[in-house]
Amino acid sequence: MVKRFVQVVCASLALVGCAGGWANAEVTLNGAGASFPKPMYDKFIAEYNRIKPEVKINYSSVGSGAGIKQISEGTIDFGGSDAAMSDKQLAEAKGGKIMHIPTVMGAVVPVYNLEGVSQPVKFTGPVLADIFLGKVTRWNDPKLAEINQGLKLPDTSITVVHRSDGSGTTAVFTDYLCKISPEWKSSIGSGTSVKWIAAGAIGGKGNEQVAATVQKTPGAIGYVELIYALENKIPFGQMQNKSGKFLSGSIETVSAAAADLKDVPADMRLSITNADGENAYPISAWTYILLYQDQKDAEKGKALVDFLTWVTHDGQALASQLHYAPLPKSLQQKIEGTLASVIVAK
Amino acid sequence: MTEAIAGMNLGTNDSAPNLAARPRPRPRRRTNRGDRIFTWLLRTASLIPILLMALFLVVLAIGAMPSIKAYGLGFLASTEWDPTEDHEAYGALPFIYGTLISSLFGLAIAAPVGIGVATFLNEVFPDRPRGLRGTVAFLIEILATIPSIVYGVWAFFMMVPWVEHTIIPATHAIFGKNFFLFAGQRGLSLFSGGLVLAVMILPMIVSISLDAIRSVPASYREAALGLGATRFEMIRMAVWPAARSGLMGACILALGRAMGETMAITMVIGNSNQIQWSLFAPSNTIASTIASQFGEASGLMAASLIELALVLFVMTLLVNTTARLIIRHLSAQKGAIV
C-alpha cells in the first residue's frame, strides 16, 4: 500500500513539473489599486493580451489607498493610484524609489438622484463644498436655485454619499475642494480618506458602490469617475470652472485642463484640478501607475516596462472609447525618460 | 488434579495460586504505550485553542500598542475618526455604539421569532407524514449555511429599498418625522443593519432552541396537561422554564455572531462615522470599519484599527462570560433541565 502511494505521488509530481516547465514562457504581472481607471485598465490589458499573449496581467480595483500600501510592501508588481504618493509615503516604500507613470486622464463628476429634473444641475465649487460640508441640506436651497435659474429643484433633503475606503477619487475631489474653499481646506483637508462631517452622509466601497448607492437613494449626491456615471446612466452635474463657465466632464474638457501644462515636476506628481483654460473641466486628474525604479525580476521588469510603453503610446488611442482623455503629448517625453530610467536586473 | 488446573487458561489473574512451577509473568503496566501516546496527543490538541486565543490577544495588543500609547482609555470615548495625513485622530465610540445597537436590535427581533419558531416546530407542527418536522428543521438550518456576502447583496438590493419605501413612511405616519428615534430617511441605516443581522442569526437561534425544547422530558408536559393547562399554558409553565438556560444560551451565541458580522453589515449600514440617535440614520460597526479601511491603513491608522479589533475581541469575551454566568445562575434554580 505504501509502495502504491509513493508511485502516485511521484506521478503527480512529474505532471506538475511538466506543467511548470510549460508555464515558464508566460509572465504574470499583478497590480492593484484605484477604481477610477479600472474600466480603462481592463481594456488596456485585454488589448495588450492580444498583441502579446504570453504576458498575463491582473489588476484588481481595491482603491488607491490600498494600491499605494501594497506597492510599498512589495506584494504587487505595480500599483494604481489617482493620488500621487506623498513624500512621507515615498520614504516608507520598502523596495526603494517608486516612479509615477501617468497613464490616462479622467474626470470626477458629481452624480445625483433627483426625480423629475431633466437637465443637468449646475454646481459651483463653493456650493459643492457647502453641500459636502453639510451646510447646504436641501436641493431647493437658495444657493443652488441661484445658479440653476430656470430649473425647478425639488424640496428634498440632500444625502451626501462618499467613499468609505481609501480612494484616489476622494483625493482628487478633496484636492479640488481645498483649492476653492478655504473652509474645507482648514477643517477637512485632502487625502485618500478624510473625515466627512455632513449629517447623514453614507459611505460606499469603491466607485462602484457609490454609484449604486446614489442610484438607489433619492436626493443623494456623490462623486464618481465619469465612466461610472455614463455606464450606469446616472445623471451628473456641470461644474463651474475657473473662467466661470459651466462644463460637463468629457474628453474635450478634461484634455483642455491639461492643455497648458506649466512646471511639470520631473516625477510628474502634479494636480490639474481647477486648471486655467476656458474649456478646462475643474475636477480633472491623471492617474498613475506606481512601480519601483529597481526591478529585481528581469522578466517581470521588462514585461512591465514594455506594457507601460505601449499604454502611454499606442494604447492612448483606446482611451476615448471609454470617455477617458488621452495624455497630452507634452507628457509623453517625460514618461519615456522615466521609463528609460527603470533599472531592470539582468 | 493440579496439572489439570495448571493447564487451564485462568486469564491474567495473577493472584490465583499457581501451583505448577511456571515462571511468574512480569506485572503489567497500568496503561499501554498506545494509550499513553493517544492521551498525550489529545492533551496537546486541547491546549491548541487556548494557546491560539492567548496568541491572538498578544499579537493584537502588540499591533495596537502605538494607538494605545497615543490615546489611552480616551480611545473608547472619542468620536473622532480623521485619517487625513496632517491631522490624524481616531476614536472608537461611534463603532462601539453601532456594533452594540445593531446587534441588540437584531437580537431583539430574532430572539422572539426564533424561540417561537422552535416552540412551534416542536409542540404544534404536525409530524405526519413522519419526518416532516425534521425536514423543516433541516431546511431552517440550511439558512445558516448561506454565505454572509449573499445576505449582504440581497439586503442591499431588496431589503434596503423596502425599508426606505415602506417601513420608513409607515413609521413616520405613526410617530411623525421628528421623533428622535425615527427621524431619518435612509434605508441604508442601523435599522437595515439590525434587520439583516436578525435574518442571519435566526437559524442559529432556532436550531439551538429546538434542541433545548426537545430535551424537556415528556413528564413535565404531561404533568401540566394533567393539571388542566391549555396547550399554551403548558408551554409557558412547563416547557419554557425548563429549557430556560438553553434558550438563553442560544440568544447569547447568536449575539456573539451578530457582533462580529462584517460583509453583510458593511453593505447596508451606510458607513458613517457619526453617532446619531435615529435608527434610520447611517452608522458603522467595528467589523465593517476594519474591513473597509484596513487595505490602505498604515502607521497610526493601522494601529487604531487593530485596537478596534482588540476592543471587539474583549467585548465578545465579556458578553459570552456574562451569559455563561447568567445561565449557570438560572440552571441552579429549580425546574431547569438543560
Image (cartoon, coloured by chain):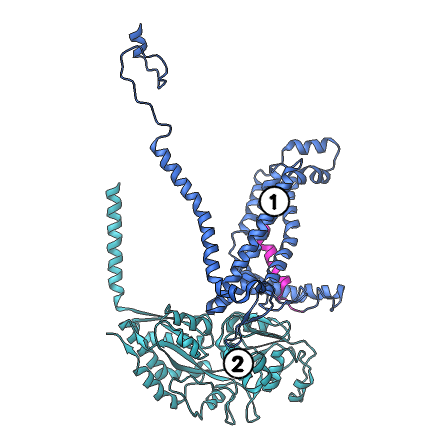
2 and 1 marks in contact (CB < 8 Å): no
- Quarter location, residue A136: bottom right
User: Which amino acid lies under the numbered mark 2 shown in the image of this protein?
Assistant: Phe
Could you tell me which chain the residue with mark 2 belongs to? A
Q: Picture coordinates of residue A227 (x, y %)?
A: 49, 78
Shown colour of chain B: blue
The reply to whether the magenta stretch includes residue B236 is no
The reply to whether the magenta stretch includes residue B186 is yes
Q: Residue at x 67, y 39 (%)?
A: B241
- The residue indicated by pointer 2 is A173
Quadrant containing the C terminus of chain B in the rendered view: top right
- The residue indicated by pointer 1 is B325
Q: Picture coordinates of residue B162 (x, y %)?
A: 64, 64
Quadrant containing the N terminus of chain B in the rendered view: top left
Is label 2 in a helix, a strand or a loop?
Answer: helix
User: Which amino acid lies under the numbered mark 1 shown in the image of this protein?
Assistant: Leu
Is label 1 in a helix, a strand or a loop?
Answer: helix
Q: Could you tell me what secondary structure mostly forms the magenta stretch?
A: helix
Image height check: is B81 above or below B247? Answer: below
Crowdedness near tag 2: few (<14), some (14–19) or many (≥20) residues, C-alpha within 10 Å: many
In this rendering, does residue B290 appear at all? Answer: no
Q: Residue at x 51, y 52 (%)?
A: B145
Q: CA distance from mark 2 to mark 1?
A: 52 Å
